[in-house]
């Protein structure tokens, strides 16, 4: 009886420490994912004459890797349904690299937030990271906080050392709307 009580006390002390260590490992993995995405973004811009991939699309949050969850054929980056990460897949080892877009601590990922649907992270393998939508678009003439269709040069990003380009986010792109995790203009 005493042995069982001692084991229960030790387990009670050990389990919270193990859970904390597991979450720290997930945080380290998430940081590594964000670093890989930053490197992929930079390599893409290097290959595209300093131009960042600009997020297009017409559906809420853009969104799909593939046209069907049971296929490995990715949509082209300029497809109306394409998720912004598709442009960076070649710099992350191909379609297998899409795991980099998922935070290991994410319980759900952005699906169709406006409909209220939630799926487990493994369903679509969408991202749990959002990209700063303003960073990839050229600023509108006369109003730098507005954006116009078309890409922005990486060298033209104001305050690149203080701008958040990619972060943990409930949405796949942060476009300044009230539903965004952040709604700040780059450099603010």
Image (tube, rainbow, N blue to C red):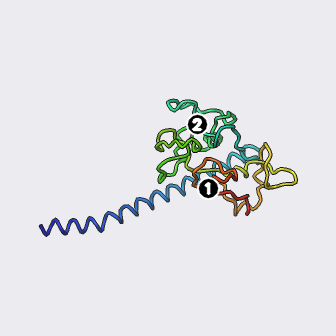
- Looking at the image, which residue is at 49% across and 55% down? 29
**Residue 97 at least partly seen:** no
* Lower sequence index among marks 2 and 1: 2
Residue 100: image x %, image y %? 54, 47
Circle 1 is placed at which residue position? 181
Foreground of the two, 116 or 131: 116
Secondary structure under tag 2 reads loop
Answer left or right for 8 relative to 141.
Answer: left
Q: Image quadrant for the C terminus? A: bottom right
Report the disc number at residue 43: none
Q: Position of residue 48 (x, y in %)?
A: 74, 43
Name the disc covering residue 65, or none. Answer: 2
> Which residue sits at x=58%, y=51%?
36
| CB contact under 8 Å: marks 2 and 1 | no
159 left or right of 67 in image: right
* x 12%, y 67%: residue: 1
Counting from the top left corner in percent of width and height, residue 159 is at 75, 62
Say which element carries label 1: loop
- Viewer-proximal residue, 171 or 139? 171
Q: Nearer the viewer, mark 2 or mark 1?
A: 1
């Amino acid at each position: 009886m005493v042995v069982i009580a001692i084991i229960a006390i030790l387990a009670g002390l050990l389990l919270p420490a193990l859970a904390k260590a597991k979450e720290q490992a997930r945080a380290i993995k998430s940081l590594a994912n964000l670093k890989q995405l930053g490197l992929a973004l930079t390599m893409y811009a290097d290959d595209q004459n300093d131009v960042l991939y600009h997020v297009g699309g017409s559906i809420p949050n853009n969104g799909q890797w593939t046209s069907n969850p049971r296929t490995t054929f990715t949509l082209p980056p300029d497809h109306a349904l394409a998720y912004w990460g598709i442009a960076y897949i070649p710099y992350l080892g191909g379609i297998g690299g899409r795991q980099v877009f998922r935070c290991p601590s994410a319980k759900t990922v952005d699906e169709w937030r406006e409909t209220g649907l939630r799926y487990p992270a493994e369903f679509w393998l969408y991202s749990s990271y959002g990209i700063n939508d303003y960073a990839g678009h050229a600023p509108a003439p006369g109003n730098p906080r507005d954006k116009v269709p078309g890409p922005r040069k990486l060298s033209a990003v104001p305050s690149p050392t203080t701008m958040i380009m990619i972060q943990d986010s409930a949405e796949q792109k942060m476009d300044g709307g009230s539903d965004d995790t952040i709604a700040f203009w780059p450099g603010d």
